[in-house]
Image: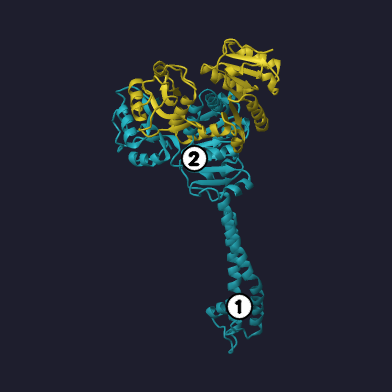
Chain colours: A yellow, B cyan
Amino acid sequence: MAFELPGFKDFVVIIGWDNFAALVVDQLVDANRQVVVLADDRKTVERITSTYDAQWVMAIEMDFLNLEEIKRLPMERAFGVYVNLATDRERLLFIYKLRKYFDDLSIISPVVNPELKESFSVHRQIFPLSRDEISAKILASHLFERDVATYLNELLSPALSDEDHDIQQYRVPRDNPFCNQMYGDVFIALKKKYNAVLIGISKQTTRGFQLRKNPPDETLVQEGDYLIAILNGRSSHELDATFAVGEGA
Amino acid sequence: MNPVKILKTIGIVIVALAIYLGLLATLIHFEQASDESSITNLGEAIWYSIVTMTTVGYGDMYPVTNQGKWIGYLFIIASMGVLGLLIGRISNVINEVRENRRLGYNGTGFTNHVVIIGWNRYAQTVLEQLVAAGVKIAVILDRRSQLELLAESYEKDQVYFLLADHHNFELARKANIEVANIVFVNLEDDTDKLVYLVNSSKFYHRKIRHAVVVNDHELVPAFKSAGADIVLSRDEIDAKLTASFIFEPEVAKYTEQLISTAADEDSFDVQQYRVVAKNRFKDRYYLDAFFEIKKQLDAILIGLATTIDGESVVLGNPDDPELKISEGDYLILITSGRVAKQLQRAFGVAEGSL
């Protein structure tokens, strides 16, 4: 029997549950993302169900290592999968199997050994994250540039109030006023009109998206590109209206 | 070398010298009694003894009396040991000095540096970020095998290694720990870190700033109350970026690069520069500086660390048109490695808050 999951759209599937998965879910819920958690024991499912609002987080008891079981979920409506298994070996094997079943799905997985990062990303749309590297870099920032660290911490957290800053990405639709304009002009216009700081652009190419940080002013902003900007909640609402799309991928 | 050892060595040298001079005096005393003797004063006696003990043996001077010949036997026998002993002692001293330097026992002159207690892959990632930012670092590790692998990998004028038990606070003074900017306590488990913090505050009379990364995020308050100045939860930080990767991968990729120290000219990084008296943006409006820095220096001004009512605050992308940049503030910018060099020249300071 298939799971219908009515009301769930663009949701994130989390495979496996532990304290870290709980922290990730907290972040996703703060960023208004719906989450489906697959756990292999009833007690965990009951605990998740009693902790989170069912409108945002749904826990399902399932033998998730059996991919046929996962196929019962409406994965075509899923935004991506976070693979939270215990070891690099388990994660790697699971990702290869998952990719065979679901071609286009974004897969995000932690990697303990950073040297395995390349092995994880042999298929497209797989994002391996070396967990220790992230926090080590943030810590280093705290040690010698404390204000940068404070700022980065704010940028990493989803904006909860209108005053909180966040890095956001906006897809450029054809009818957007910035479409076919020079990057330098968009940079000035975004700051003056919306107090948004344009920090990069992700250009659509034949080989997928190519991220360009602080590119030359002459770079053309084209339909389908993503503009990446730092802005607060207030500016975000105004930009949402201008871009006629919400923030995010 | 410790003082007891030095005193012992000095004592041995004095006794050896006294015996040597005594033998020379005796030799001169007996030889002066003979008319055929070639050893009649101290200079000749020293010459004879050294030529004999170094096994050169010119034969220009030699004892002729029986008593003098007995002393001559002693110098000949000594010649077999003295040279070997001297060479051995000298090479021992050289080896000891070299070993002490390698293990860090000669200490470091670093000040305002970062001290890392404990070594693993995590510490190495932190160290590499700090090295790329030009920060001086002292590492205290307790395994000789690790030190031997690492000692040659970094410039000695930037990274200093000390082999010591992590809880040996006295030996840690060799890392100039009391004048460090901050000490990163990187021990294996959270309990060990907590014990270190408590004992460290008891041992050192000066206030030392500590940073810890806790494995269990629920222990953050315990570390704060133990006096840690920076307490980060590894899981919380990772969860933030993980969530970001899930729903906005382009942003997460950008953020991941921003949190890394720019290791080469083409990579990007967030940096902070103190506003000094000669900074041309001092007393200028933030918004004017924003556009000028982008146009003239190709860097993106994203915030200002300043003081409001005596309290340090970080203003992210402020929109107040009246906000001015003051001396002592920090400009926070996104910049590439190449532009960072121009910024250092333009602002007249190195990056960072150390």
Q: Which mark is residue B232?
A: none
Residue identified by numbered label 1: B26
Identify the residue at horizontal 33%, vertical 24% (top origin).
Answer: A189
Question: Within the image, what quadrant is residue A42 found in?
Answer: top right
Give me the chain letter of mark 1: B
Identify the residue at horizontal 58%, vertical 11% (top origin).
Answer: A53
Quarter the C terminus of chain B occupies = top left
Is any part of residue B258 visible from this angle? yes
Disc 2 residue type?
A: Leu
Quarter the N terminus of chain B occupies = bottom right
Q: Tell me if A189 is positioned left or right of B205 in this view.
A: left
Question: Within the image, what quadrant is residue A89 found in?
Answer: top right
Disc 1 residue type?
A: Thr
Give me the chain letter of mark 2: B
Q: Where residue B236 appears, x then y in whole percent?
A: 55, 25
Numbered disc 1: secondary structure: helix
Circles 2 and 1 on the same subunit:
yes
Residue identified by numbered label 2: B130
